[in-house]
């Protein structure tokens, strides 16, 4: 069985309520005073407070940690950021950690209750605390100025696939003599590879294995006075002669150069211009504006969310493969991040766009039932993520009679995407212009500033970066004409019926239906590769009704012609890719990419010493298909991390899977280019 779910920490609680690891027989923090220990050992010995205020030297401070534990070090680092922010300007905090055996949320709450002074922060951590599933989890606080990227799983495995450079390291795993398997030579090599110039480290431990390992990683190591009863501890500074960059951490040669570069300081109107005001564009604009960038959003429609993002309701849903591969890891990351994203965003909005009513993936026929059985036999996920239900249980949860069971995603539900786009783009820090048709954009070779021109040949704006989020229209721009995307027409049906239908959760089978909103049920959708128009079709309503009632017998009275009061619909073009994975990242220069990697035509395993070729400052975020509600929030976070040179919210393997370059490389190997 594959284990996306990882074992949680087995704890013993001492007489005053402090946690102890049963496996390692070791404490998570000092019994004398955990906060003072963290302050001295990690914050003071890495000079964290002063570095927060070096706004003239850095754009953010990246702290990496071995051993998340109770999150105390993160909370103390966040508290220090908070204190400094009150007095004067500070740089954003990006905290990266890894944990092989995460605490249960209930245990985390109990452990952090020992620190009342941190309550205003610890409650926010607990609210976003991720499920115990393997992989990368992005948590966002302080409107994006404080970020926690928590990797769950083995430290070597997770950090070897991570993309970041740390300014400071907190080595806070269990004592080496109690967890020898963790402090390996490979782990120290990874620490060196992920260290920025002049990075520092500290640890409470005086163990020789850490001293030798950090020296091997390129650090000068010294002994300094320890905390409390400990006579000594270790600290040091990175001294290796290296020009390591996040790009160099990517394994494939054509991806090197595909990540961000420092923001160009040449004068222009905007830091970032986003083309497209749908889900991809709105979430990207929000992520960038939260980082303090000046953002302009352009769209040819009269309002946000008028294209593929304009349906009244959509299911927050992702179907997982039986194999826990990169695509499944990506789908899981998308779903978990979007669930948290909508919850946080809804809390800040008076407009109701999110309903976490739960979702059942119904085993509606024998083929689907077999797939779900195979999936459950091969995988173990936390029950709080998905829970297998029989027909009786599914009926009780959904509120309507079901003849089949299925998988219950209790944290999912439905989103009103057009409302969401409007909420996001009403941000005062985002400038929007609608009814704007863009003809072209060109880059000044000297300044690398982009000029954006409309169909009347009028200059709209100049911008350091452009993010194209305009779905299938992206191919209209000459730099992106090579992208492999295709439109798929889909029509949803919206019905008001005289029949009561007490549906409480979203149901997904062949199509979906959501609980009623404003006394109307939304269901569908068609999948049409032949038509490229967006007119409402009567025959598509018939298709949607026939499709739904074939697997959801209880909906027949609701949708009988004698009971329907009104039947409306909406059609739009979804944009997808040949492999049905979104296309997200820096736009490749296709001709130069072909020139550099032409050897692949004759040898698929050819060696290269050149990076990929990319248009600096030009990014794409498209081809989310019917899963955009799940994938767009994390895609926006990834684009923002590229533009702002931040740690990535996804692994290097996922970067490869979503890269706009992947089709060029595949076609070279297949001799199609």
Image: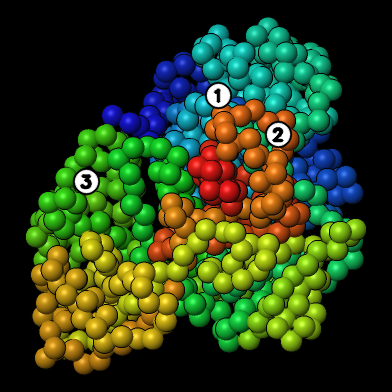
Quick check: can you spot residue 622? yes
Label number found at residue 248:
2
In the rendered view, tell whether residue 116 sits above or below residue 423: above
Residue nearer the viewer, 603 or 164: 603
Mark 1 = which residue? 156
Label number found at residue 372:
3
- Image quadrant in which you'd find residue 470: bottom right
Tell me the SS state at disc 2: helix
Quick check: can you spot residue 429? no
> Are the residues at dot 1 and dot 3 in contact (C-beta closer than 8 Å)?
no
> Are the residues at dot 2 and dot 1 in contact (C-beta closer than 8 Å)?
no
In the rendered view, tell whether residue 479 sits above or below residue 69: below
Residue nearer the viewer, 541 or 476: 476
Residue nearer the viewer, 428 or 69: 428
Q: Assess disc 1: are there few (<14), some (14-19) or many (≥20) residues with their C-alpha within 10 Å of its C-alpha.
A: some
Residue depicted at 58% across the width and 48% down the height: 673
Residue depicted at 66% across the width and 46% down the height: 594
Q: How far apart are marks 2 and 1 (CA)?
A: 18 Å
The mark that comes first in sequence, 1 or 3, is 1
Across the whole image, how many numbered discs are drawn on residues? 3
Label number found at residue 365:
none
Name the quadrant of the N terminus.
Answer: top left
Q: Assess disc 3: are there few (<14), some (14-19) or many (≥20) residues with their C-alpha within 10 Å of its C-alpha.
A: many
Please state if 446 lies on the left or on the right of 409 as rendered: right
In the rendered view, tell whether residue 672 sits above or below residue 416: above
Report the mark closest to the observer, 2 or 1.
Answer: 2
Tell me the SS state at disc 1: helix
Residue depicted at 57% across the width and 31% down the height: 603
Q: Where is residue 124 in the image (x, y as percent from the top left)?
A: 54, 52
The mark that comes first in sequence, 2 or 1, is 1
């Amino acid at each position: 069985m594959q284990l996306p779910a990882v074992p949680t920490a087995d704890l013993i609680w001492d007489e005053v309520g402090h946690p102890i690891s049963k496996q390692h027989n070791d404490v998570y923090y000092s019994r004398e005073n955990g906060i003072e220990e963290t302050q001295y050992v990690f914050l003071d010995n890495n000079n964290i407070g002063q570095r927060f205020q070096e706004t003239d030297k850095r754009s953010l401070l990246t702290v990496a940690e071995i051993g998340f534990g109770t999150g105390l070090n993160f909370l103390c680092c966040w508290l220090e950021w908070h204190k400094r922010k009150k007095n004067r300007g500070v740089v954003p905090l990006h905290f990266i950690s890894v944990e092989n055996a995460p605490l249960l949320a209930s245990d985390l709450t109990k452990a952090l209750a020992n620190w009342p002074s941190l309550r205003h922060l610890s409650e926010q951590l607990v609210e976003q605390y991720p499920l115990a599933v393997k992989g990368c989890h992005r948590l966002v606080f302080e409107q994006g100025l404080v970020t926690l990227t928590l990797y769950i799983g083995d430290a070597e495995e997770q950090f070897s696939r991570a993309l970041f450079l740390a300014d400071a390291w907190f080595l806070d795993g269990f004592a080496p003599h109690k967890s020898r398997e963790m402090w390996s030579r490979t782990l120290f090599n990874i620490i060196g590879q992920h260290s920025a110039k002049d990075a520092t480290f500290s640890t409470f431990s005086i163990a020789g294995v850490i001293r030798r390992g950090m020296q091997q990683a390129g650090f000068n190591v010294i002994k300094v006075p320890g905390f409390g009863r400990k006579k000594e501890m270790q600290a040091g500074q990175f001294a290796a002669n290296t020009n390591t960059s996040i790009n160099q951490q990517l394994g494939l040669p054509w991806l090197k150069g595909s990540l961000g570069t420092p923001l160009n300081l040449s004068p222009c109107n905007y830091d970032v211009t986003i083309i497209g005001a749908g889900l991809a564009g709105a979430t990207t604009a929000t992520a960038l504006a939260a980082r303090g960038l000046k953002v302009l959003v352009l769209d040819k429609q009269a309002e946000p969310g008028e294209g593929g993002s304009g349906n009244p309701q959509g299911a927050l849903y992702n179907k997982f493969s039986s194999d826990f591969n990169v695509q499944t890891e990506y789908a899981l990351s998308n779903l978990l991040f979007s669930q948290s994203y909508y919850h946080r965003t809804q809390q800040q909005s008076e407009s109701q766009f999110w309903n976490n009513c739960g979702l059942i993936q119904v085993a509606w026929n024998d083929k689907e039932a077999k797939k779900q059985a195979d999936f459950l036999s091969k995988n173990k996920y936390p029950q709080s993520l998905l829970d297998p239900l029989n027909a009786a249980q599914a009926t009780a949860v959904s509120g309507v009679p079901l003849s089949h069971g299925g998988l219950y995603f209790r944290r999912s539900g439905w989103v009103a995407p057009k409302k969401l786009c409007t909420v996001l783009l009403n941000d005062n820090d985002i400038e929007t212009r609608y009814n704007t048709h863009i003809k072209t954009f060109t880059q000044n070779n000297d300044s690398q500033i982009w000029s954006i021109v409309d169909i009347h040949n009028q200059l709209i704006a100049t911008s350091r970066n452009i993010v194209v989020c305009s779905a299938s229209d992206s191919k209209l721009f000459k730099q992106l004409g090579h992208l492999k995307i295709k439109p798929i027409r889909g029509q949803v049906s919206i019905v008001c019926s005289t029949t009561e239908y007490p549906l409480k959760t979203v149901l997904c089978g062949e199509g979906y239906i959501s609980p009623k909103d404003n006394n109307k049920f939304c269901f569908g959708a068609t999948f049409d590769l032949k038509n490229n128009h967006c007119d409402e079709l009567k025959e598509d309503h018939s298709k949607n009704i026939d499709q739904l009632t074939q697997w959801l017998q209880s909906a027949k009275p609701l949708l009988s012609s004698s009971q329907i009061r009104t039947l409306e619909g909406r059609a739009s073009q979804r944009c997808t890719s040949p492999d049905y994975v979104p296309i997200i990242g820096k736009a490749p220069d296709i001709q130069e990419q072909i020139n550099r990697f032409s050897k692949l035509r004759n040898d698929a395993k050819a060696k290269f010493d050149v990076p990929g070729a990319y248009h600096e400052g030009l990014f794409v975020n498209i081809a989310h298909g019917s899963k955009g509600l799940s994938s767009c929030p994390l895609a926006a976070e990834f684009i923002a991390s590229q533009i702002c040179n931040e740690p990535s919210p996804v692994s290097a393997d996922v970067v490869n899977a979503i890269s706009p370059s992947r089709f060029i490389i595949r076609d070279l190997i297949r001799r199609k280019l």
